[in-house]
Image: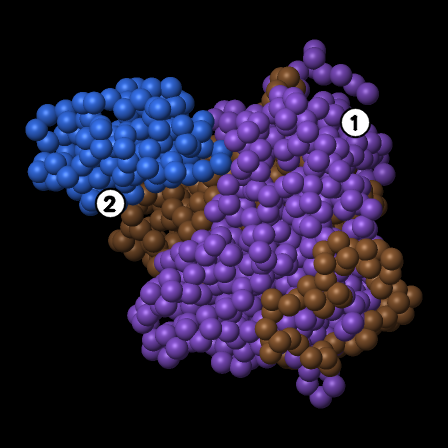
Amino acid sequence: MSEVPSDLKYTRAHEWLRLEDDSVVTIGITDHAQAQLGDLVFVEVPETGSSLGAGDAAAVVESVKAASDVYAPVAGEVVGANEQLDESPELVNNDPFGEGWIYKLRVENPAALDELMSAADYEAFAESEED
Amino acid sequence: MTELIFDHSHPGRSNGAQMLPPAPEPDDLPEALRRSERPRWPEVSELQAVRHYTRLSQLNFSIDTHVYPLGSCTMKHNPRACNALAMLPGFLERHPLAPPEAGQGYLACMYDLQNILAEVTGMRGVSLAPAAGAQGEFAGVSMIRAYHDARGDTERSEILVPDAAHGTNPASASMCGYKARELPTDEEGDVDLDALRDAVGPQTAGIMLTNPSTVGVFERNIEEMATIVHEAGGLLYYDGANLNAILGKVRPGDMGFDVIHLNLHKTFSTPHGGGGPGAGPVGVRENLLPYLPTPMVAEEDGRYVWRTEADCPDTIGRMTAFAGNAGVLLRAYVYIRMLGRRGMERVAEYATLNANYLMTRLREAGFEVAFPKRRASHEFIVTLKREHDQYGISAMDFAKRMLDYGFHAPTMYFPLLVPECLLIEPTETEAKEDLDRLVEVFTTIREEAENNPELLRTAPHTLPLRRLDEVRAARDLHLRWSPEDSEPATGTEG
Amino acid sequence: MPFIPHTETDVRSMLDAIGVEDIDGLFDEIAGGLRAGELEGVPEGMPEMAVNRLMERRAAQEGRPLCFLGAGAYPHHIPQAIWQLTTRGEFYSAYTPYQAEASQGTLQVTYEFQSMMAELTGMEVSNASLYDGGSALAEAILMAVRGNRKAKSKRVIVPRAVHPHYRDATRTIVRNQGIELVEADFDRSTGTTPLEQLDAALGDEAVAAVVIPQPNFFGRLEDVDALTDRAHECGAQVIAVANPTALALLSPPGQWGAKGVDIVVGEGQPLGIPLSAGGPYVGFLCTRKNLARQMPGRVVGRTVDAEGNTGYVMTLRAREQDIRRSKATSNICTNQGLMVTAATLYMSIMGPEGFERVARHCHANARALRDELCAIDGVSAAFDGPFFHEFVLRIDGRPVTDVLGDLAGEDILGGLALEPYYDDLGDAMLVCATELHGEDERRAFAEALARAVA
C-alpha cells in the first residue's frame, strides 16, 4: 500500500491538504494518485491571486497516457504555486507529500476543512476503489 | 538509426534539375520586409533525398506490408486504382475556385458521391465539406445547435455520450459550446437504458452514438434510445466510425439518426497516409438540410453547380478554405463505383465474418473477450487482465511483441472501460490464412508471457529501434532539429 | 468479389468454426425491421477497367486551362520525385504513428517537416500540421484565446484583408465558443491594413489576439512590424497568416516587430501539393516553445529507445481528444500526414536556394504580368505598393464576370472576381502569377484579356 501520512487531510479526488496556519493549506496529490497516473510529464499550476470555488479545477497533472484535473477541495484564494514543477514535474512522483506539493490556498471558510477525510478514512477509501 | 535529412546537407550542394535560372533582385520589396537569411533547409542532391525518404518509408508498418488489425481504424486494402484515378491530371490541376463551366467532370463525381452516401446512410442530404471525421462531428453537432437555436430552443446545454465513446465526441461537443454528459455501458455492452432515461431532459441537445458501438457490438436498443431522446426534444448523432460493420445492411437513417458523419478513410478505403488526410462527409434528415456546411454540389438544368453561403443562408458555413479534401473524396468515389451496391453489402458481411471467426478462434485458444455473449461486429475486444495479473505483462507489452512477429498491434487501451484491452479489427480484405496466423502469434506470445515475460516487457526486439521513451520525449521537449544537432564531426555521410 | 479474398471453402469453414449457418446469421442481433432493402440509389459495381474509362472521361472534361487563379491555392511546379515517393505504400497505407517503433518513417518525416516549417517561419516549434490554412487560422485563434489568460478577453481582430474563406471557416469553427471576431478595414488606395484601422478595431477593450496576413488576400505586403508591435503593446497575441513561398523572400514572422509574432499559420499547398480542386492540402501552425502545450493537433518529439538510440514519438499527447476528451485543446484527430510527407520532400528537393528562386520567379512574373495587363485600355491596378505574386486589377466598361467568362472560353482562368466578397470592389479581380507563368503564358493572357475588355 502506498504512503498515507497521518497528519494530512484527504479528498475523494486523491488530493491531500496540509494546514499551514489558521487559513492557509498546501495541496498536492497523494502517493496513490501519482502511482496511478505514472510518470508525470507536466503540471499546470494555478495562477497566484486567482480565486477558486469548491470543486473548481485548479491544476492539471499530465502523464503520457492521462491528464487529470486537480480540484480545489474548498473555496479560497490561491496564495502560492510550486513553480519548480514547471521544470521538474517528476517531483510529484518522487516526493508527492513534500517537494511535489502543487499549490497553496487561503481558505474562505476553515470550517469546511472538517468535512475532509482523515488518513485512515482515505486509506479505506482508496482500497475500496481498487476493487 | 537513421540520420535526419539535415545530416546529409552540404553548403552549396543543390539539386540542379529543380533550379530555375537566376531571377532579378526583387528590388521593389522594401528592405524592412525582406528576409535576411535563408531558412536552414537541407542542401542535398535529388538522389540523397530520394534515398533518404525511401529508407524512411521502409521503417513503417503499413497495410501494403503488414496485417494491420487496428480496432476502430478499419485498415483495409487501399486499392491502387483509387489513387491513380484521383491523380489524373484533369483532377489534379483543377483550381478550387475554377468556375463550374471550366469543367464538369469533378463536380459530376462529387454530385454522385453526395447522392450515393445519402442513399447508403438513409439520409436526405450530404455535404462533403468536412476534412476529417472530427470535423464531421463538429459540423454535425454545430447543425444540432443551429437547429435548436433556429427554433428558439436555446436552453439545451448537454450532449450525451456513452462512456466508451471516441474522445472526439466529447471534444466536439465542447467545441460547440455543449457540456458532454457520459452514459454508462451495461454488462453486455449496450448503453444503460435506465441511465439514459434519467439523463435526458429539457437540457438535452442530443446524443452522439457509434453503432456498432466502440466496444464492438451492435447497440440493440437503438430504436428505443431514439424514441427516448426524440421525446425529450433531442437529436441523434451517428458517429460513422464503425459503418464498415453494417454498410448496405442497416442504414443510420432507419435507426432513427438525424445527423451522421462518415469516415471515408475507414469505410470507403481512402488511405490513412500516416495520419491523414481523412474526409468526414456529413448527412442529415430533412429537418437539418438548411444547416449543412458549404460548399455542396447541385444539379441545375443538367449542369452541376456549387451551392455556397449565398444559396444556403442558414448553413453553419465553411469548414475549410475550399471544398474539403477533394482528392480523398475522389478516391472514395472510385472505390464505391468498383464495389457497387452488392459490393458494399459484402464489405459488412465479410468484415463481420472475419471478426467473428477471429474472435471464435482466439476464445478457443483461451483468450478472454470482453463481451462473450455477443456477436462481434467488425471488431471485438480481448482483455488481457488475466495475463496481466498472472504474468505481470500489460496489453502494451503484448502489443509491442506482436510487432516482432510482423503484425501491427491492435488498438490498445481503448475503450477505457475494459482493463488491459486490445481492440481487434481484421477488416474484410484479410484472408483466412492470415487470421489463422494471427491466432498462432497470439498463442505464442502468451506462452512467452508465461515463460519469459521479460521478453514482452522489453519488446520489440527485431525492429530498428527498441521501445521508445515517451516520458522523456514529453518532459524534455525536442520538437525540431537545430544546427547543433548535426555536428559535422560526428555526422556520417553515406 | 472486389477486394475480398475468401473462397467458398474458406467461408464454409469459418462459418462452421463460429457455429452459424450462413453469413446472415452473424447479423442476428439486429432487429429485422432495421435491415435495409435494396439500395436503389447505388449503382451496380464495375470492374476497374470500366471505372478507368469513366474517370478518364471525367478528368478529360476538366481540360487543362492556363490558370492565373490564386486566392489561396497556387499552381506551382512539383518535382516528379515527390509524389512517386509520397504514394509509396509504406507512407500511403500506414496509420497514425501510435506504435512508434513500427512508424519511425512517418514520425521522422514529420519531425523534419516541423523543423523545416519552424525554420521557414522563424519560430521555435511547429505542430505536425492541420487540415488546411483556413481551419488552421481558426485553431490558432482558439489557441491564442486559451493561451492569453492575462488578457481574459475573447476578442480577436481579423482584418478584412485576410482571405474571406479563411474568415468564413473561422466563424464556423469558433462561433459557439463566445469568441468575438472584430474586423479591421483595409485602405482603399493601398489595399493594406493601416495602423489607424487596427487602432479603430482595437478600441479600448482588451484583445486576445490580432491576425496579420502576409501577403494579404490582395497580394499586398502589410507593414507587419508596426502592426505586430502595436498588437503586442495592447497585450494581444499576434497570429500571422503567411504564404510559405512568399516567406522565401519576406521577413519570417518570428522576426516581425520587436518581439516576433506568437503564432504563425498558413496553407502549405504551395509546397509540392497539387491544386486538386481544393484539397487535401496541409495547414501549418508554428509557435513559441513556451506555447507548445497550447498547440492543437499532433506533434512529434525526439527521444531515445531502451538502448539509447535516437527515435521519434508523438508527444504532448495528453492535450489531445483521445485522452483529454471534452477538455482537449481541440477535437482534431488526424493531421494531413501524407501532405506533410509531400511538403517535406518538396522542401528537401528544392533546397533553400531552389526555393528562393521559385519565389523570385513568382514575384518577377507577377510584376511583369501586372505591367503587361495594365498596358491594356480599361485595365488598371487597384492598389499601389509592393505585392508578392498576386495583385488586384480594375476593369472598366465590362462586368468582371463577363470578362472572366470570355477568358474561360479561351481556356484561360484569368482570376477571381472580388465582387462576391467585397461590395466596394465590384469591378475588381484578383490575379496570380507563379514560376509557371513565363513570357508565353503571360502574352497569351494579355492578348485574351485585351480582346475581352475591348
Residue B24, horizontal then vertical, whole percent: 73, 42
Kind of residue indicated by mark 1: Arg
In percent of the image, x 85 and y 64: which residue is there? C1
Question: Which picture quadrant has residue B107?
Answer: bottom right
Q: CA distance from mark 2 to mark 1?
A: 61 Å
User: Horizontal placement of B307 versus C146: left or right?
Assistant: right
As drawn, the chain in brown is C
Residue B238, horizontal then vertical, whole percent: 54, 66
- Spot the residue most to the right: C49
Quick one: SS at disc 1? Answer: loop
User: Horizontal placement of C191 versus B375: left or right?
Assistant: left
As drawn, the chain in blue is A
Q: Is residue C371 above or below residue C261?
A: below
Q: Which mark is residue B13?
A: 1
Question: Mark 1 packing: few (<14 Cα in 10 Å), some, or many (20+)?
Answer: few
Kind of residue indicated by mark 2: Gly
Q: Chain of mark 2?
A: A
- Colour of chain B as rendered: purple
Q: Which residue is label 2 attached to?
A: A55
- Spot the residue most to the top: B489
Quick one: SS at disc 2? Answer: loop
Q: Chain of mark 1?
A: B
Q: How is the image coloured?
A: by chain
